[in-house]
Image (cartoon, helix red, strand yellow):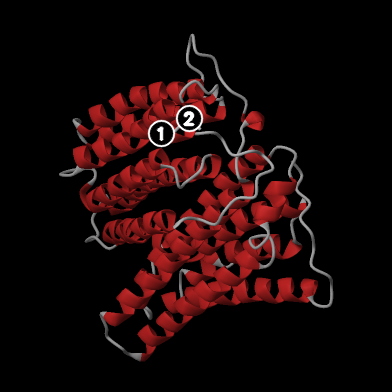
């Protein structure tokens, strides 16, 4: 009783029935709608700058830098989602963690357009605060619980990487990219290896306790946030006009593509991900795998949204290869991630996924010589074919239960 009054935390039991995402968690997600639109705006600016002798290389480096920012945003969101899936999200320490991450994510979103120039320090400080305060707050709230050692190790790791983040913000662009990339890689490897710190040991992910259905729901909700961002980008782009036939077709195809992406996700693996996590022998293992899978799909959705904007503004023009890579590569990345999700839930992959990927790849070269709106049309048709294949497989059959390979 005294422990509860003191605000001490306990990990959720492995067999606990989790609650739905709290209003605070959904409020937190709304910040990412804004942040993802800033990611798209930044990428669009890189892709539509005035051509020059180094324009091609500039597109490559610009895309890499934008991806780096997206990965940082994802790291903050995922760390927060895992935290609320391991502990009671209604406790004051947990709500403090979420509110801190919300504010920091908003600052990061504001800083994204000039994150490698004027607002580099703003972005880095917000990221470091979000990542360091989470394990520090939890280590205090956990008291003598054995998990406290894990939080201390995490705080040490993020403090070390924080030096790279803030130090990189003080350098020129090349040094900044190098240090920030190193920091992200360091954090990723540390998480994969159980947050090892000399003298403090490491942990095994299979022993982590999480509310599996809650974590799965959080991934589903972030997917919807990313999908909603594609619709926002398409709507904003078309609303700027002109409203001529080519632009109208590009907008209609963009909307149809978003609907197809939603349908493919929820049929049926995306709908019962929580069941798969619950059935897995080690829920945390499939939870971590699903995190990587959803990251791939979210990157694909972000690329698709940028492709929408490019084609809606230039529907009847022949488009450069960099633009086509987004228009076709976005749906392809989504399908690759969705194929992995299907394997995580059912231990198999439907042939329609690979066939669709092959069609998208094979059509890239001829589409370089055709109007851009035709590339969007092809992407929509390929996704529609996958939707039909999924519907035919499920028609008349009982709902397929989850059968995770983990």
Within-10-Å neighbours for mark 2: few <14, some 14–19, many 20+: few
Precedes in sequence: disc 2 or disc 1 = 2
Q: Residue furthest bottom?
A: 245
Element class at badge 2: helix
Q: Residue furthest front?
A: 1
Compared to residue 3, the image places residue 232 above or below, namely: below
- Closer mark to the observer between disc 2 and disc 1: 2
Instruction: Examine the rendering and report whether any part of residue 324 can be seen.
Output: no
Task: Identify the residue at image location x=46%, y=78%.
Answer: 255
Q: Is residue 378 left or right of residue 206?
A: left
Residue 39, horizontal then vertical, whole percent: 33, 56
Separation of residues labelled 2 and 1 (CA atoms): 36 Å
Element class at badge 1: helix
Residue 126, horizontal then vertical, whole percent: 27, 40
Instruction: Examine the rendering and report whether any part of residue 84 can be seen.
Output: yes
Compared to residue 150, the image places residue 289 above or below, namely: below
Per the image, the residue denoted by label 2 is 3
Residue 147, horizontal then vertical, whole percent: 53, 25
Q: Is residue 165 left or right of residue 7?
A: left
Per the image, the residue denoted by label 1 is 184
Task: Identify the residue at image location x=51%, y=30%.
Answer: 191
């Amino acid at each position: 009783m005294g422990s509860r009054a003191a605000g001490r935390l306990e990990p959720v039991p492995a067999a606990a029935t989790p609650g739905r995402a709290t209003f605070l968690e959904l409020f937190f997600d709304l910040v990412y709608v804004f942040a993802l639109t800033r990611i798209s705006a930044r990428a669009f600016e890189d892709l539509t700058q005035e051509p020059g002798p180094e324009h091609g290389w500039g597109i490559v480096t610009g895309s890499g830098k934008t991806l780096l920012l997206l990965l940082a945003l994802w790291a903050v969101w995922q760390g927060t989602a895992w935290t609320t899936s391991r502990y009671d999200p209604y406790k004051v320490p947990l709500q403090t963690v979420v509110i801190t991450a919300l504010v920091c994510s908003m600052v990061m979103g504001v800083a994204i357009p000039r994150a490698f120039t004027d607002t580099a320090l703003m972005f880095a400080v917000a990221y470091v605060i979000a990542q360091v305060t989470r394990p520090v707050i939890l280590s205090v709230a956990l008291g003598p619980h054995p998990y406290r050692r894990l939080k201390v190790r995490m705080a040490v790791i993020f403090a070390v990487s924080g030096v790279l983040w803030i130090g990189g913000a003080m350098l020129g662009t090349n040094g900044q990219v190098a240090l920030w990339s190193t920091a992200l890689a360091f954090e990723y490897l540390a998480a994969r290896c159980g947050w090892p710190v000399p003298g403090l040991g490491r942990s095994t992910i299979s022993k982590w306790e999480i509310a599996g259905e809650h974590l799965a729901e959080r991934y589903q909700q972030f997917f919807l946030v990313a999908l909603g961002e594609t619709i926002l980008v398409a709507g904003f782009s078309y609303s700027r006009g002109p409203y001529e036939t080519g632009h109208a077709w590009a907008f209609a195809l963009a909307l149809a593509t978003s609907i197809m992406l939603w349908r493919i996700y929820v049929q049926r693996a995306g709908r019962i991900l929580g069941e798969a996590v619950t059935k897995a022998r080690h829920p945390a293992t499939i939870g971590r795998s699903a995190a990587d899978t959803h990251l791939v799909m979210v990157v694909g959705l972000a690329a698709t949204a940028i492709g929408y904007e490019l084609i809606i503004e230039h529907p009847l023009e022949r488009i450069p290869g960099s633009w086509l890579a987004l228009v076709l590569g976005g749906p392809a990345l989504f399908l690759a991630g969705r194929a992995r999700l299907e394997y995580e839930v059912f231990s198999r992959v439907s042939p329609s996924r690979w066939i669709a990927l092959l069609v998208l790849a094979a059509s890239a070269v001829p589409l370089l010589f055709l109007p851009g709106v035709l590339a969007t049309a092809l992407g929509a048709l390929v996704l529609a074919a996958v939707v039909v294949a999924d519907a035919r497989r499920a028609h008349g059959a009982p709902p397929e239960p989850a059968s995770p390979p983990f």
